[in-house]
């Protein structure tokens, strides 16, 4: 006796028709939309963790110049005559006002997001971010602010989207 799997495509055809009509009639299916939103939240967290770690001096970003450190010392009210190498201060990189870091979360001031029929984009619109991500000439050292997620983060993002699609398909075949 043979061992086999039989597939009945009639339910799949109905599910695909239901999904197509859901997409054609306006907003995307809520489950798929939620999966995408969860994936974007996961990416936001990744980007912020990478930024915080690099800003704190993990070695991925060049340190700020001594002249910038001296300026920050003056702005912070450091005693006159304290030299940068002796300063009892830390100088986080690309973190003066917190605007750039904060903009890495959807809904925050300076955040950028866009959606097309087949893609979503998430990032920052803070003016000076571009000059660090893509420096021109010798003006700034490059500091990658928005980076492609690592494998574990990407797997989590894809998993969230798959869960959304699976929930949408399950509803469509009911």
Image (cartoon, grey):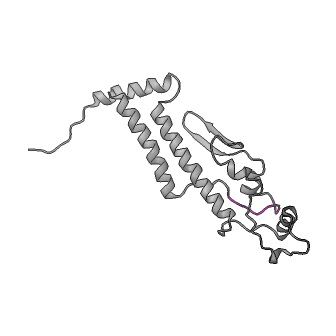
49 vs 155, nearest the viewer: 49
Residue closest to the eye, 141 or 87 = 87
Residue 147 visible, this orientation: no
Q: Quadrant of residue 166?
A: top left
**Would you say 166 lies left or right of 53 here?**
left
Quadrant hosting residue 17: top left
Residue at the extreme bottom of the image, as rendered: 86
Residue 4 visible within the image: yes
Q: x, y percentage for residue 37?
A: 53, 40
Q: Position of residue 33 (x, y in %)?
A: 50, 35
Q: Tell me which residue sits at (28%, 27%) in the image.
A: 10
For residue 150: magenta?
A: no
Residue at 21% across / 37% down in the picture?
A: 6
Judge from the rendering whether residue 159 lies leftward or rightward of residue 133; answer left or right.
left
Q: Position of residue 133 (x, y in %)?
A: 71, 55
Is 139 colored magenta in this rendering? yes
Residue at 55 percent across and 33 percent down: it is 117
In the rendered structure, the answer to whether residue 72 lies left or right of residue 155 reads right
Give how far across and how far down residue 11 sits, in percent. 29, 28
Q: Please report the residue visible at 49 percent of the width from the left and 37 percent of the height from the top.
A: 34
Which residues lie in the magenta part?
137-144
When the figure is inspected, residue 31 is found, relative to residue 133, above or below; the finding is above
146 vs 58: above or below: above
Closer to the camera, 168 or 105? 105
Quadrant of the drawing holding the N terminus: top left
């Amino acid at each position: 006796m043979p061992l086999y799997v039989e597939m009945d495509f009639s339910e799949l055809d109905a599910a695909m028709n239901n999904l197509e009509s859901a997409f054609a009639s306006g907003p995307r299916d809520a489950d798929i939309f939620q999966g995408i939103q969860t994936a974007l939240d996961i990416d936001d967290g990744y980007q912020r963790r990478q930024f915080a770690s690099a800003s704190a001096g993990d070695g991925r970003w060049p340190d700020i110049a001594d002249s910038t450190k001296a300026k920050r010392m003056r702005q912070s009210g450091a005693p006159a005559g304290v030299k940068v190498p002796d300063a009892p201060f830390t100088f986080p990189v690309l973190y003066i006002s917190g605007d750039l870091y904060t903009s890495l979360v959807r809904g925050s001031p300076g955040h950028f997001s866009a959606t097309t029929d087949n893609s979503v984009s998430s990032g920052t619109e803070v003016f000076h971010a571009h000059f660090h991500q893509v420096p021109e000439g010798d003006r700034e050292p490059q500091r990658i602010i928005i980076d492609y997620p690592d494998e574990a983060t990407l797997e989590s993002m894809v998993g969230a989207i798959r869960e959304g699609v699976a929930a949408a398909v399950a509803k469509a075949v009911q």
